[in-house]
Amino acid sequence: MGGDNGLMPNDHSFGSISTRVHAWADTLPEFAAEAVYHADLTGPHVYTEFVAVADQVRRARCAIEGWSQQLGVPAVQEQDIVLAVDEAVSNAVDHAYPDTDGRLCLFAACTTAARALRVIVADKGLWRPPPVEPGFRGRGLMMMQRLAEVFRLSHGPNGTTVMMGWSLAG
C-alpha cells in the first residue's frame, strides 16, 4: 500500500518490494506462494510484518480497511474482508506464540487479472487445534470460512498460514 500503512512502513532500502515479497512467498505453503506470485504489486497492496501483540490487531484492521477503500470495494464486502482478517490476525496473536514473542506477516493484494482479492496472514508459531465444543470463543476459523469465498489453511512445525479470497465485486 503506498506509504505508511499504520504498521511498519515498507522500507525500500533493502531492495524492491516485489523482491522482498517474493522471497517471503518462497517460505509459504504452495497455495499461498502462488497467490503472492499472481498478485499485482503495482496497485494498492499491503505487505507488512509486525509483532504478534493485541494492540497490533486494530492497526492491521486499519491497514486492510485502507487497502479495500483504495480499491473501491463495496462496503458490505469490505466488512466481510475486515472481519475475516481481524479473526485471522487475532487467532495468530492469541495462539501462535504462547510462551514467547513472535511476528506475523500480513499481505493483501489483487490478482494480476484484477478479478480477485487475496489476503494472507502467516506466523512462524505453534498451531493449537480448535476445541471440539468452542463455547463462547473458538469460532474464528468457522467465521473466516463463511466470510471468505476462498479459504485455505496450512499449519505445521514452521507456523500457520491462512489465505482468504474474494471476487472483486463490480
Image (tube, helix red, strand yellow):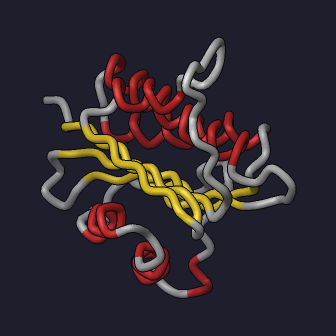
Q: Can residue 1 be seen in this view?
A: no
Q: Position of residue 50 (x, y in %)?
A: 69, 57
Q: Position of residue 160 (x, y in %)?
A: 54, 56
Q: Position of residue 33 (x, y in %)?
A: 34, 69
Say whether residue 85 is left or right of residue 25. right
Number of marks in picture? 0
The answer to whether 26 is drawn above or below residue 117 in the figure is: below
Quadrant of the image containing the C terminus: top left
The answer to whether 91 is drawn above or below residue 9 in the figure is: above
The answer to whether 151 is drawn above or below residue 19 in the figure is: above
Residue under the image location 80 percent in, 50 percent down = 98
Residue under the image location 83 percent in, 59 percent down = 101
Residue under the image location 63 percent in, 65 percent down = 124
Say whether residue 113 is left or right of residue 28. left
Residue at the right extreme of this rendering: 99
The answer to whether 19 is drawn above or below residue 64 in the figure is: below
Res. 26 image quadrant: bottom left
Q: Where is residue 30 in the image (x, y as percent from the top left)?
A: 32, 69
Residue at the top extreme of this rendering: 136
Residue under the image location 62 percent in, 39 percent down = 91
Q: Is residue 77 visible?
A: yes
Say whether residue 102 is left or right of residue 35. right
Say whether residue 7 is left or right of residue 122. right
